[in-house]
Structure formats: C-alpha cells, structure tokens
Amino acid sequence: MKKILIFIMAAITKLNKSMVWIIGTIVLLMSLLLTVDVILRYFFNSPTSWAFSLATWGTGLLGFALGGYTLAIEQHVRVDLYFEKFSPRMKSIVDMISAFFLFLMAAALFWFGLGYVIHYYQIGATMTGGLAMPLWIAWLIVPLGGLLIGLQGLVKFFNDLSIIITGKKIYEYEIEEGA
C-alpha cells in the first residue's frame, strides 16, 4: 500500500513540475505572437484583433496552471515570522490546519470552474474579440488549476500526516533551490 501511495505522490509531483515546461513553452509562443502584434501595430499601423484576448487568456493560464508547481517546490505564500522557528512536527500540524483552506479553495475552483466549462460548452459561447476560440476551452484552466493544486495539496497533506505520526515524510521530493 505504501509503494502505491509513493507512486501516486511521485506522479502528481512530476505532473505539476512538468507544467512549468508546458506553460513556459506556451508563454514563449505567446510572447512571440505579441511581439508580432507590436511590430504590426507600431510599424505598419495594422494591429491584430486577437492580441488582447491572447494576453488575457495567457495570464490566466499562467496563474491557474502553476499553482500546483508552486506548492510542489514549496515557494507558495506563507507567513514565516514564526513558522521557521517551529519543529518539523509543529510545521506539519500548522500545514495540516491550513490544508483545509487549500482544499476548500481547490474544490471551489474545480467545482465552479467546471460548471462554467459545461455551461459555455452547452450554449456554444465563443470569446469576443479577434480570438474566436470556444469559451469553454479558455475556462478549462480554472478547474484544471484547482485539480492540480488540490492533488499537490494531497501529496503535502500525506507527507505532513506522516511527519506528525512517524517524524519523517512518506515521499521525499527534490525541492529546487532559488526557484
């Protein structure tokens, strides 16, 4: 049972860590397309109609899709004034209490985001502006982000539970320094 749990925890962490490369590639492509728009706008007086929609959608994608990655590398926002002075067991207790709010937020993002995805799919809504993409695709990043951060939260939750009970983590994953 422990090996299965470690396998699942490793898969979730690897998925979230791979998102930085996927989203990074998308951001690079977006940057190139927005550079083309700037050149067309200022040098040829012929702006594209899709640049604003692309920038808005890309910013949302960046924010929602990398929440799990941020949690995986332990670079999420936390008040360290007292936290850093705590023992590993006490840190895990505090983290498990705050996990309630993390799971509440992740569930809300997933549930309400999925509701919007289904609604926009059913009515066939498309984005306004030049990027006439189906709106449900753009909204898919909300439940996806909730799912990714919720799954990584489970990894952290089981590690914290193990630290409280045994004094050590179930699954040790590499945390990138200086990230």
Image (tube, rainbow, N blue to C red):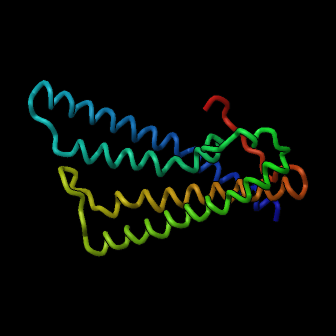
Q: Residue at x 34, y 49 (%)?
A: 57
**Number of labelled discs?**
0
In the depicted structure, whether residue 118 falls above or below residue 146: below
- Choose between 3 and 165: the one closer to the eye: 165
Instruction: Answer with left or right where residue 166 lies relative to residue 1.
Output: right
- Choose between 77 and 167: the one closer to the eye: 77
Q: Residue at x 66, y 43 (%)?
A: 79
- Dividing the image into 4 quarters, which one contains the C terminus? top right
- Dividing the image into 4 quarters, which one contains the N terminus? bottom right
Q: Residue furthest right?
A: 166
Q: Residue furthest top?
A: 43
In the depicted structure, whether residue 177 falls above or below residue 127: above
Residue 156: x and y in percent read 71, 53
Q: Quadrant of residue 115?
A: bottom left
Residue 142: x and y in percent read 44, 59
Q: Quadrant of residue 2?
A: bottom right
- Choose between 66 and 18: the one closer to the eye: 66
Instruction: Answer with left or right where residue 45 lies relative to residue 92.
Output: left
Q: Residue furthest bottom?
A: 122
In the depicted structure, whether residue 24 falls above or below residue 66: above
Q: Residue at x 33, y 38 (%)?
A: 30
Q: Residue furthest front?
A: 81
Q: Residue at x 38, y 34 (%)?
A: 28
